[in-house]
Structure formats: structure tokens, C-alpha cells
Amino acid sequence: MAHPASTPLPAFQTRPDPDNGTTAKIVALMLGIAVPALLGFALWAAVSAQKARDDAKTAAAGTAAAAPATPAMAHETSTAAVASPSYAGTAPANADALATAHVPYPATLPAAPAGAVANVHLTLKDVVHEVAPGIKYQAWAFAGGAPGPVVHVRQGQTVKITLTNDGAIPHSVDFHAARIAPNVAFRDVNPGESFTFSFKAGDPGVYMYHCGTKPVLAHIANGMYGAIVVDPATPLPKADREYVLVSSEWYLNAPGLDKPAGFDMAKAHAMAPDWVTWNGYAGQYVKHPLVADPGETVRFWVVAAGPSFDTDFHVVGTLLNRAWLDGDMTKYLVNVQTATVPAGGGGVFDVKIDQPGLYPVVSHSFASVDMGQVGLLKVGDVAGTASH
Ligand SMILES: [Cu+2]
């Protein structure tokens, strides 16, 4: 809709006089950005305990009022056409203690194996996964939870994948780093069976892997994804620390407090998640920050697993010194404020931070931050947040 003709155009803004309190304004602005991120859990804990109880009552009432028209899928997956109420921010009274006790997903990039062949054994399993403090979800995932293990190989290696299905229904695995006939390599594997295929890691970068069994939306949303890092044959500039971050969103058909929630297809179709996470657990690197020393180059290998959300990668308080977008490791952009990682894509981002502090790592799509996609990079010996 056009603006009314009488709407005045905004005046051009001039840069404020640097001596006129600008520093204080910038600090205030930064705090305005960072503090809400840091206080996310406190807010969830304070506001959401009651909300969770209310939502649980609402959900129970809704279930009673509207009997499901279709039978539920395995694992209580909801295929109801009407989405459950939002459970965003649900938190038990002891959420803070649970967040502290939580063992974070290991974000540090593991070493790549030597030799011509990288053997990777992945096991698929039905597991109860915690997506946030005290929030349980009946996941279909790789053994150990979601995301699956970080696979790290070298360009030129043959990657030999063995997939074992310990779940209750057929699953598969699709590697975006592979150039291979998917009908053969990514085929369904029945429960109790194993399947092996190999591909040449010809394309460096960071790539998603995921179950590709239909409905893919449900299999990814239920936790079946991970990241594979393929080291370029021509090494990247040296990095002092390397972290892998996989973003994903979660669609819950129940609060997940008393018993595990299942998947809500209507919410997934509406792209209205309850939680958005780095490495499968809301805010885990707020309580347990990623760390670096001042002046170090920190490399983030980022995958947006979705199933449907992009990640707008941003580190509050700095710029991305280098940004390799998706699978193109032949060149990088410099001084990027926010880099989009599309759902199903990846990106490699370097930051070099000299000033000690707590730097939030977010998707700058801030609904995602509110739903849990925030972590901290702790640079130097900074007080105020629990460490590992
Ligand atoms: Cu699957």
C-alpha cells in the first residue's frame, strides 16, 4: 500500500558529533542488543513457568474439544490440521539450574582422519532429546541426539558412510557434500538394517547431512541432521579456534515438560516453531560460552539445517572478517555484518576480536533469538557468565 501523499519523507540523518556523547549512545545501543539476548533465559524462567502451565491447560482443553481427524503417526507425531498453541519460552521453575547442568553439544571441530578413506558410522535412533532446559522432545535422531555427530574429512578423501537404522521406521542419509545418485546412495534403510555407500569429498566447505525419507519435513524437524566439514586441499588462512554451529527449529505438539513433546506438522507447515537452536539446545552457549583469547581468529562452520528457517549469521559487537558463502571456498567476502546461511546450506565465517567481552552469536532474524538461537563467544577472561 502506498504511503499517503502527505507523509513527509524522513530527513537525512547526519552523523552525530563524536564529542557529543556518541560513545555513551553506542554503548547503550550495544547493551540494548546484547542484554536482551543475555537475559533471554531469565525472561523465559520468570515469565514462562506460568505460561507453560496456562499453555498446558489450553492444550489439554483444545485436545478435548477437537478430536484429531487423522490418526497420529508413530511417536505421537501430530498431523492435525490445526497447530497446537505456541510453547515458545516454556520453562520449568528450575530452568536456570538445568541450563547450568546441561552438557553442551561439543561445538569444537574434531580432527579429520588421515588416510585415503574416512570411515563414518552413523546410527539412527529414537531418543528423547532436550531442546531447552527441561523441555523434552521425542526425536528421531542420530545416536547421541541432535544434531548428529560432526563429520570432518579432507578434500579428496573417499568418505565411506555406514548407516545403521536402530529406529522404528525407515530412514536414510543425504549428504549435501556428495555428488552421487541419490536414489541409490540415499535410499531408505529399514529398521535393524545397515547400508554402506561411498563418495569422494571433492567439494570443500561445510555441508548439511540429513535423513531424506518422506516426509522429509518431519524427519529433519525430528532431529535427523548434522554437519560435514570438508577441509580444502588448499588450506584456509590459519584459525586459532574452530567451532561448528548447526541451526534448526523445533515444532512441538505439547509443552514437553511432563512428557516428551512430538512433532506438530501444522506448525511446521506454518513455519511457526516453538524453539530455534544452535546445536539442538536453546541457549546452551549462553550458559556455557564458546571461548577465545583476544586477537585470536575464530572460525565458525555454520549449517542451517532448517527444516525451513535460514540463519542470518551475526556476531554482536564485531564484523565477520571473512565470509565464505555456501560451498564456494575459492573466495571470501570481507567485513560482513550479517551473512545468510540458507536452509540446507552452509557458510564459513572468521572473526578476530581484540577486545575482551561477551559477544552474542545469533541469527539476526530476532524471532529466532527469542526462541533460543543465541550463544556467546567469550573473548578473554570475562566475568559474569558461567564457563564450561
Ligand atoms: Cu528419517
Image: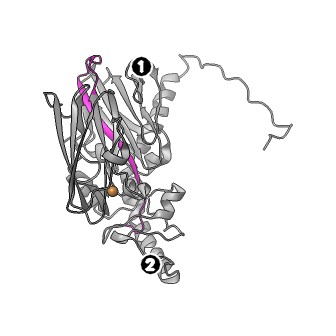
In the shown orientation, is residue 355 left or right of residue 217? left
Q: Quadrant of residue 139?
A: bottom left
Q: Are marks 1 and 2 in contact (CB under 8 Å)?
A: no
Q: Looking at the picture, does residue 182 appear above or below residue 236?
A: below
- Mark 1 lies on a secondary structure that is loop
In the depicted view, which residue is nearer to us: 96 or 229?
229
Q: Is residue 108 visible?
A: no
Amino acid carrying label 1: it is: Tyr
Q: Residue at x 31, y 57 (%)?
A: 171
Q: As drawn, which residue projects farthest toward the right? A: 5
x then y, percent, for residue 387: 21, 40
Q: Which residues are magenta?
A: 231-255
Residue 53: % across, % down: 40, 72
Q: Say which residue label 1 marks.
A: 332
Q: Secondary structure at mark 2?
A: helix
Q: For the point 39% across and 67% down, which residue is it?
A: 255
Sequence-first tag of 1 and 2: 2
Instruction: Give the number of callouts.
Output: 2
In this view, the residue in front, 68 or 386, is 68
Quadrant location, ligand no. 1: bottom left
Q: Which mark is residue 27?
A: none
The quadrant where residue 207 appears: top left
Say what amino acid the circle numbered 2 marks.
Ala
Pointer 1 local density, CA inside 10 Å: few below 14, some 14–19, many at least 20:
some
Residue 304, percent across and down? 40, 41
Tell whether position 243 is magenta: yes
How many angstroms separate mark 1 from mark 2 (CA)? Answer: 51 Å
Q: Is residue 76 above or below residue 40?
A: below
Residue placed at 50% from the left, 42% from the top?
365
From the image, tell me which residue sits under label 2: 60
Task: Name the side, left or right, on which 27 lies relative to 259.
Answer: right
Q: Assess whether residue 208 is covered by the magenta stretch.
A: no
